[in-house]
Image: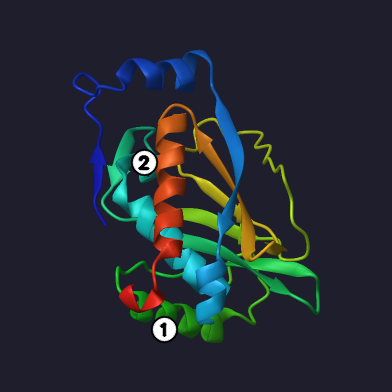
Amino acid sequence: MTFTKVDQETWPRKECFNHYFTQVPCTYSAVFNLDITVLRQRGAKLYPTMLYLLSTVVNRHQEFRMACNQAGEVGIYDVVHPCYTIFHRDTETFSNLWTAYTPDYKAFCAAYEQDAALYGNCHGLLARPDTPENTFPVSMLPWASFQSFNLNLQKGYDYLPPIFTMGKFYREGDNILLPLAVQVHHAVCDGFHLCRLVNELQELLDKPFESL
């Protein structure tokens, strides 16, 4: 893991960052309906596949790999990993796990299955210990679909990584759609960047999964 501090004097985004981080702190969220028809037709497991695809597009772009370190310095990780929730039916609580990202789809899914087997029955909030700093959060609400979703973070204006929440997929005509809520910090991510991420995610979902 490498954390590279941003050179504020040469950063093209310096003015926008200072405006939305200091002067007018601003986060925003949006919900997109992803077409997961191909994924369902191929019989791929939904959660690990979405974790992999989200990680793939997040790691393509530096605006989604940004964070503030413990000293409050803004920088970019060379790679980030998904930190995701699992639900415990017996206690109706959840825990956080994380799986190291690898560009190899099959290797990532195998690592996910191993992490779930090792830590899935641990009921603490952090089921897998030693969560690295370079993670981004993902959760899923498989019990209902939604058209709007927003997280209200009391002290979240210095939190730069994207936050993803998926809902229950549903059928619309011949297609199967999955609600995806994305919350980002405007200091590092504009609408252009968010839409590019979602469009690239949809392009990956439309591919035959043998090509992953």
At which x and y percent is residue 74?
A: 34, 33
**Viewer-nearest residue: 198 or 106:** 198
Image quarter where the C terminus lies is bottom left
Asked whether residue 133 appears in the rendered view, the answer is no
Q: Is residue 136 left or right of residue 210?
A: right
Number of on-image labels: 2
Quarter-of-image position of residue 84: bottom right
Q: Is residue 85 above or below residue 135?
A: below
Q: Position of residue 110 (x, y in %)?
A: 41, 83
Residue topped by disc 1:
110
Q: Position of residue 65 (x, y in %)?
A: 36, 46
- Give the residue at x 63% y 59%: 177
Q: Which amino acid is tagged 2?
A: Met
> Can residue 62 be seen by looking at this rendering?
yes
In the rendered structure, find residue 165 and report the number of the disc placed on it.
none
- Residue at 30% in and 55% down: 79
Comparing labels 1 and 2, the label whose residue is closer to the camera: 1
SS at mark 1 in the image = helix
Can you say whether 150 is above or below 51 in the image? above
- What residue is disc 2 on? 66
Q: Amino acid at mark 1?
A: Ala
> Which type of secondary structure does the marked residue at label 2 adopt?
strand
